Image (spheres, helix red, strand yellow):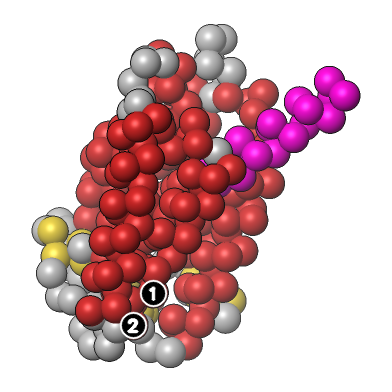
Amino acid sequence: MSLYLIILLISLAGPLALSFEKNLRLYRRWKYLLPAILITMVIFVTWDIIFTHMGYWFFNPIYNSGIYIQKLPLEEYLFFLVIPYACAFSFYAVQFHFPKFRLSEQWTKMLTFLIAAASVSISLFFKELTYTFVVLLVLPVVLLLSYCFAREVVQYYLAIYPILLVPFFIINGILTGTGIEQAVFDYNPEAILGTRIFSIPIEDMFYNFSLLLLPLTLTHIFETRFKKTKNA
């Protein structure tokens, strides 16, 4: 079994088992959450395939199964199912147990537009660095759409995201080379700033922000529309 797959299985085991916990009962949200994750997966896998073909990042065959589809190892496809699910579990668990742990509407509005404006400005400044440029343009799009269609989600997400960074630094740290001889995947230095936290390119924090927020937003939209249709 590859190291990449082992990391994914460990990441999924706890959240999946606890999804049936009698109070949280995340499994009841699966009919909204799983389609949301699949839609997010299609978007980010397409991005992944394009950037891999363009040589902006690459995967170390030592640490994956050797099964490739469009130059992406099988584990990379599973990544976009496992990590959003695991983080969605963490998000809903914090939201359930600490319902007041969210930003006010005023702070949410201010931070949303501040983050969006800063992200666009910085992306234009580094437009010659492809990954940096794209990831900083995607973030405000996802954030502003989320603010428009799932404002309550953004209120919680902006408060909870620093907590989600803890498993992010552990998992992404290992995948990008922390504690192992070589990285599971790495980046073309011409496409990124080169600033890293441990072994993690700083851009991954913004990539992760969008990757985790989008399925939460879509889940909220699907769930809200279902309830409206049911009550109509």
Amino acid found under the numbered disc labelled 1: Val
Q: Residue at x 58, y 76 (%)?
A: 69
Q: Residue at x 31, y 60 (%)?
A: 117
Q: Position of residue 146 (x, y in %)?
A: 51, 46
The mark tally for this picture is 2
Secondary structure of residue under mark 1: helix
- Above or below 63: residue 21: above
Residue 226 in magenta stretch: yes
Residue at far top of view: 22
Residue 4 visible? The answer is: no
* Residue sitting nearer the eye, 132 or 14: 132
Tag 1 near tag 2, CB within 8 Å: yes
- State the residue in front, 39 or 83: 39
Quadrant of the rendering where the N terminus is positioned: bottom left
Q: Is residue 26 above or below residue 55?
A: above
**x, y percentage for residue 10?**
39, 41
Q: Which residues are magenta?
A: 214-232
Say whether residue 32 is visible.
Answer: yes
Q: Residue shown at 40%/60% (left/top)?
A: 139
Question: Which residue is outermost to the right?
Answer: 232
Residue 28: x %, y % from top left: 67, 24
* Element marked by disc 2: helix
In the rendered image, the quadrant that contains the C terminus is top right
Question: Which disc, if any, is residue 134?
Answer: 1
Left or right: 208 as drawn, with respect to 50: left
Q: Which three-letter amino acid code belongs to the residue tagged 2?
A: Thr
| Neighbourhood count class around disc 1 (C-alpha, 10 Å): few under 14, some 14–19, many 20 upward | some
Residue at numbered disc 2: 130
Spatial distance from mark 1 to mark 2, Cα to Cα? 6 Å
